[in-house]
Image (cartoon, helix red, strand yellow):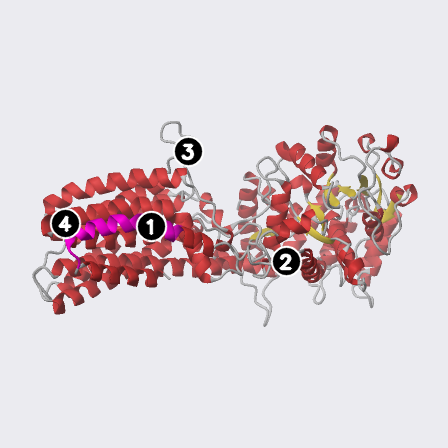
């Protein structure tokens, strides 16, 4: 698409050469407004995602719900297997009705006083209406019955850290969606909502309606709802038609200052759809004291009794594997139900950690752990045992090298690097590790200096190569290597600043984080345009014209771009992030987002390039060159700004390694488009300048050589500018020097994921257990 637009511009320029100059000015000025209006209308019509033609009838939404349910079954089955809930029976956790007075009694849910809060939902098929006895207590298997039988549609499951909330959420939502899929009657199945399990990640209840957040998450998490045949309104339609049930895991992950607003929003949402919340006790109870959730069935997961823990230890590994090691532990737990070991194993998390600590093959050195756990007085508190079991995760993940089974990292290395990561995440109060934000871990000054050096080398290389291959072709003046390197270094400084703070808005007067002037984009645009004008106008009109034109162009472009990028901070159309959209739609979507920067850069660049040339060589030539430069800059800087805003979607189901690879592809495509635009502008300008005194046989090769050299170098620079992965690779070098991470840090993170120390949550990494992160963060630095 970029190449097509540039070819059209080139053809238009050739036509202009044969038109009378006075008529030409009137023709262009009259057609410009019509052309711009048609361009904008055409782009937005193309970006409508087929929402006008797409089917959003009830029949279509029912089919979308069925497709969503089929995908949900596969997704939650995978999560069940990832948590080892298939290979091993889950810990038989029990729950009881919450004893906190703010939640009332089971009778209040079944028989509300004064008729307040009449039932909103029918009992689901194959279930019975909830009764006080059903809500009094139960096990994991009965959670589905509560969800299906409570006619208020509101269920809350509370528990302490490690109590099994997430496992309960996965098992219950999988049971619910399987029950729906098992209904053969199509009409009856349509009346059953599709349960979806989400975390509140990325939701700010004070700035985004919960319905909008839920609709966005449905699109990002489930490819079935990104089908081109569906309307953009389909997710919202599924919500409004009660075809969705929300299982929200991790209510306590919401910022503490926003819990009240979150509960209010969820209360309003649960008026139309079924809602099941999983949360830690303290956070939800505090929020409920301020903002109640009426007629909600509030259940609390209970500690694992000593007898149940002992039974699990005895039964988890069949065929007597390591029975001589497990049996003494089980007996100690039964004999001393209030002992340190029994109290340490009261949560499913710690029980499963001990289960997973048992090796499946060789047991060299492992009996020492059993001996430690059985030694009286070895551990004073349950927390001491917890730390020992957490440490065992690393021992098992990074064993000593054995024949045909090398370990790429030693235990000491892994513990040191993972500890540094955990410490940083703890200081940032982050549960997730985003590789594209790791530039915040090291000083930006060195990366900006690298940008200055790279810009200087690139510009010097352009001048040297262009001079080497074109000086002998004709009589022309080429900017020297040193002036070009200085200009490139200045441009590298601006680009480095934008790369580090590409989305930051800075108020120059008040210094606030959000303002109407984007200083970074203004600086980059101004320096880029000024440098380009100096390089293109100077050889043609002389140094005096370049000295006058370059500062004017830089100042105009910088101010215009800064205000345009700040005031017109356009939201990317859906097509820009929809993987099902065509490449053409995604390309145009990014161009739309970057139009403020593109127009603010292209207009002054075209004027600054065309006016001096027009004064020196005539209106026709000046207008041709001005249009060529302007169009090229609109495309180049518009796309650079539009694509530079891309970071992995926080709600995307794509894993971190895939997001890394996609970023590389995205930076490559951006560099190609930018290089084509800049190469075209530079090549055409140089060709026209050479044609003043040389034949076309000389001017065309000169333009081609200049265009190729400028395009390759500037395209490479642009690709690196918008690349999150390239910047992160530079950060990894910094962190390696500081002994924070290995040089190939992405390889290390992927290896830790494969060893079950880390796990994927969309494009993020997370520690397999939050307690493991806390444990590693407390370890002294080595």
What is the CA distance from the residue labelled 3 to the residue labelled 4? 38 Å
Q: Residues within 10 Å of mark 3 (few under 14, many from 20)?
A: some
What is the CA distance from the residue labelled 4 to the residue labelled 2? 67 Å
Q: Which residue occupies the foreground of this view, 386 or 553?
A: 553
Q: Is residue 405 above or below residue 430?
A: below
Pointer 4 or 2: first along the chain: 4
What is the CA distance from the residue labelled 1 to the residue labelled 4? 25 Å
Where residue 594 sits: x, y (%)? 39, 48
Pointer 3 or 1: first along the chain: 1
Q: Work out which quarter of the rendered image holds the N terminus and state it.
A: bottom left
Q: Answer with left or right where residue 235 lies relative to residue 86.
A: left
Q: Residues within 10 Å of mark 1 (few under 14, many from 20)?
A: few
Pointer 2 or 3: first along the chain: 3
| Disc 2 to disc 1: CB gap under 8 Å | no
**Magenta span contains residue 36:** yes
Secondary structure state at the residue bearing disc 3:
loop
The residue labelled by disc 3 is 515
Q: Residue at x 20, y 49 (%)?
A: 25
**Magenta span contains residue 167:** no
Secondary structure state at the residue bearing disc 4:
helix
The residue labelled by disc 4 is 614
Q: Nearer the viewer, mark 3 or mark 1?
A: 1
Q: Answer with left or right where residue 336 lies relative to residue 30.
A: right
Q: Quadrant of residue 282?
A: top right
| Disc 3 to disc 1: CB gap under 8 Å | no
The residue labelled by disc 1 is 34
Pointer 1 or 4: first along the chain: 1
- Magenta stretch: give its range: 19-40
Pointer 3 or 4: first along the chain: 3
The residue labelled by disc 2 is 756
Secondary structure state at the residue bearing disc 1:
helix
């Amino acid at each position: 698409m970029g190449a097509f637009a540039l070819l059209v511009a080139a053809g238009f320029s050739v036509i202009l050469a044969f038109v009378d100059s006075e008529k030409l000015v009137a023709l262009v000025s009259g057609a410009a407004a019509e052309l711009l209006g048609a361009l904008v209308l055409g782009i937005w019509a193309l970006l409508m995602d087929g929402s006008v033609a797409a089917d959003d009838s009830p029949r279509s939404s029912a089919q979308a719900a069925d497709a969503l349910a089929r995908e949900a079954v596969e997704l939650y089955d995978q999560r069940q297997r990832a948590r080892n809930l298939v290979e091993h029976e889950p810990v038989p956790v029990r729950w009881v009705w919450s004893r906190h007075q703010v939640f009332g009694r089971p009778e209040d849910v079944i028989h509300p006083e004064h008729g307040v809060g009449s039932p909103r939902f029918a009992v689901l098929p194959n279930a019975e209406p909830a009764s006080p006895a059903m809500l009094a207590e139960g096990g994991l298997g009965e959670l589905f019955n509560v969800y299906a039988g409570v006619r208020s549609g509101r269920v809350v499951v509370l528990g302490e850290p490690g109590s099994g909330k997430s496992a309960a959420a996965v098992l219950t939502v999988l049971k619910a969606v399987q029950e729906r899929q098992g209904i053969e009657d199509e009409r009856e199945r349509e009346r059953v909502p599709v349960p979806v399990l989400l975390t509140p990640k990325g939701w700010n209840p004070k700035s985004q309606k919960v319905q909008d957040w839920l609709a966005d998450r449905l699109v990002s998490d489930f490819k079935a709802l990104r089908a081109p045949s569906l309307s953009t309104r389909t997710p919202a339609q599924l919500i409004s038609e009660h075809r969705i049930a929300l299982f929200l895991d991790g209510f306590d992950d919401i910022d503490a200052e926003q819990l009240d607003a979150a509960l209010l929003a969820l209360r309003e949402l649960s008026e139309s759809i079924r809602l099941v919340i999983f949360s830690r006790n303290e956070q939800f109870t505090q929020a409920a004291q301020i903002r109640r959730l009426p007629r909600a069935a509030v259940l609390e997961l209970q500690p694992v009794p000593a007898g149940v823990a002992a039974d699990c230890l005895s039964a988890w590994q069949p065929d007597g594997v390591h029975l001589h090691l497990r049996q003494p532990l089980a007996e100690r737990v039964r004999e001393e139900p209030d002992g340190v070991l029994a109290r340490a194993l009261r949560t499913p998390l710690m029980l499963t950690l001990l289960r997973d600590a048992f090796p499946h093959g060789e047991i060299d050195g492992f009996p020492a752990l059993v001996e430690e756990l059985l030694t009286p007085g070895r551990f004073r508190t349950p927390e001491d045992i917890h730390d020992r079991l957490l440490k065992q995760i690393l021992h098992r993940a990074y064993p000593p090298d054995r024949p045909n089974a090398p370990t790429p990292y030693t235990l000491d290395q892994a513990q040191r690097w993972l500890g540094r990561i955990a410490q940083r995440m703890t200081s940032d109060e982050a549960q997730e590790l985003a590789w594209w934000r790791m530039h915040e871990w090291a000083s930006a000054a060195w990366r900006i200096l690298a940008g200055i050096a790279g810009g200087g080398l690139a510009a010097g290389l352009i001048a040297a190569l262009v001079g080497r291959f074109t000086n002998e072709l004709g009589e022309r003046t080429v900017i020297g290597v040193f002036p070009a390197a200085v200009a490139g270094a200045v441009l590298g400084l601006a680009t480095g600043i934008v790369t580090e703070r590409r989305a930051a808005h800075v108020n120059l007067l008040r210094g606030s984080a959000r303002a109407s002037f984007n200083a970074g984009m203004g600086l980059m645009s101004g320096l880029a345009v000024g440098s380009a004008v100096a390089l293109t106008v100077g050889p043609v009109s002389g140094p005096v014209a370049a000295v006058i034109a370059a500062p004017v162009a830089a100042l105009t472009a910088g101010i215009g771009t800064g205000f345009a990028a700040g005031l017109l901070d356009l939201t990317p159309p859906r097509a820009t992030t929809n993987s099902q959209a065509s490449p053409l739609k995604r390309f145009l979507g990014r161009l739309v987002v970057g139009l403020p920067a593109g127009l603010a850069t292209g207009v002054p660049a075209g004027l600054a390039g065309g006016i001096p040339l027009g004064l020196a060589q005539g209106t026709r030539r000046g207008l041709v060159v001005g249009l060529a430069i302007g169009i090229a800059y609109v495309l180049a800087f518009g796309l650079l700004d539009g694509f530079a805003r891309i970071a992995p979607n926080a709600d995307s189901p794509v894993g971190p390694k895939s997001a890394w690879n996609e970023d590389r592809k995205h930076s490559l495509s951006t560099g190609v488009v930018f290089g084509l635009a800049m190469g075209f502008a530079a090549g055409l300008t140089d060709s026209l300048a050479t044609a003043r005194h040389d034949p076309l046989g000389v001017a065309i090769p000169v333009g081609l050589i200049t265009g190729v050299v400028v395009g390759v170098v500037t395209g490479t620079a642009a690709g690196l500018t918008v690349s999150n992965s390239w910047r992160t690779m530079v950060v990894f070098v910094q962190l390696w020097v500081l002994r924070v991470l290995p040089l190939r840090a992405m390889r290390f993170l992927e290896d830790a994921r494969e060893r079950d120390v880390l796990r994927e949550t969309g494009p993020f990494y997370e520690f397999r257990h939050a307690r493991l992160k806390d444990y590693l963060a407390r370890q002294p630095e080595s």
